[in-house]
Image (cartoon, rainbow, N blue to C red):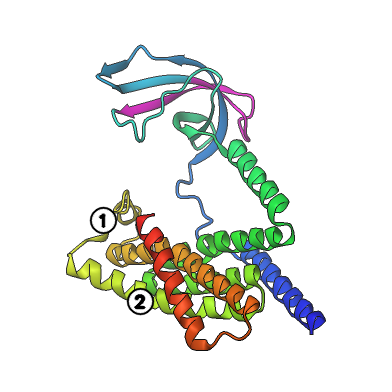
Amino acid sequence: MKVQMVARESILVLGLLALVLILILIPTGFERKIYSNAVGTKARVIAVDNTTLLHKGVVRMGEQVVTVRLLGSPFKGMETKAVNLLGGKLEFDTVYQEGDLAWVLLEQSEDGQIIFANMVSLYRFPKELQLLLLFATLLLLVSGRKGLRTLLSFTLAFLLIWKVLIPLCLKGYEPILIALLVGAALTVSCLLLVAGLTRKAYCAIASSLLCSLVTCLLATVGTSYFSIHGAVMSWSESLLFAGFEQVNLTKLLQAAIYLSCSGAILDLAVDISAALDEVHLHNRGVTRKELFASGMHIGQSVVGSQTTT
């Protein structure tokens, strides 16, 4: 029996690995460049000119002229001056210093020469990659083989959002339906990978999917009842200006509400399911009624802490 279970779980893992590879290979449909005459590249800041910056209270406004050495093709090694416009908002503004690694957008002429260079942001990818590797290492050290499954689940979640959810929403498909399908796929795959092909996982999946439907309904009814437009999401209206007029921002907000809750739903479901599994494991004589009552008691305590969180 145990051998059969291991074989079934191995098939599950291999199947999800194959799905990950497929998602990596499939195109999103948005691979083309938005600006045909522009290219982004990383660059090293070698000098800054702050003479035209204005200090107003705690913020800076105006224009910072930055001299950068380009580190990517087709201008690797070239030095050029780039403009960094500051609007007086600490949330968005970056004041560069000598030695910073940055991402620069270069506008080119028809003959391939640089016309204009604009500072976009600090280039954080190497540090983010280090953090991701540290996270993966600690997860493997603490959780062992289950850590590998968790990383697979994490990768699948990232790819489903990047390759399925976002492209389909941008193409005008129903956001709440797409979010629900993606959320259901993530719930099933994550719980099966973490809890295995067990009753514990099946119970958690059933409750998570039921709660997902309720959450979607509440998100839909709530935004309508309170007359909340999807434009309340930061930068959401920029989608319309970028040519995606077919995107319904309010429905996109509803989908975002559900997705932001889906992790807590999954977590709560597996917490209670795992607790009840332990109760049954150590007391085989417990009745279904008693097990249900225990689940309600556990749920009341966990829901209380989740609400505060």
- Please give the range of residues in magenta: 67-87
Mark 2 element type: helix
Main secondary structure along the magenta-highlighted residues: strand
Residue situated in front as seen by the camera: 132 or 137: 137
105 to 67, vertically: above or below: below
| Whether residue 246 can be seen here | no
Q: Residue at x 35, y 76 (%)?
A: 214
Mark 1 element type: helix
Q: Quadrant of the N terminus?
A: bottom right
Q: Residue at x 28, y 17 (%)?
A: 54
> CB under 8 Å between callouts 2 and 1?
no
Q: Amino acid at mark 1?
A: Ala
Q: Which residue is mark 1?
A: 231
Q: Residue 137 in the image: x percent, y percent?
A: 70, 47
Q: Amino acid at mark 2?
A: Val
100 to 226, vertically: above or below: above
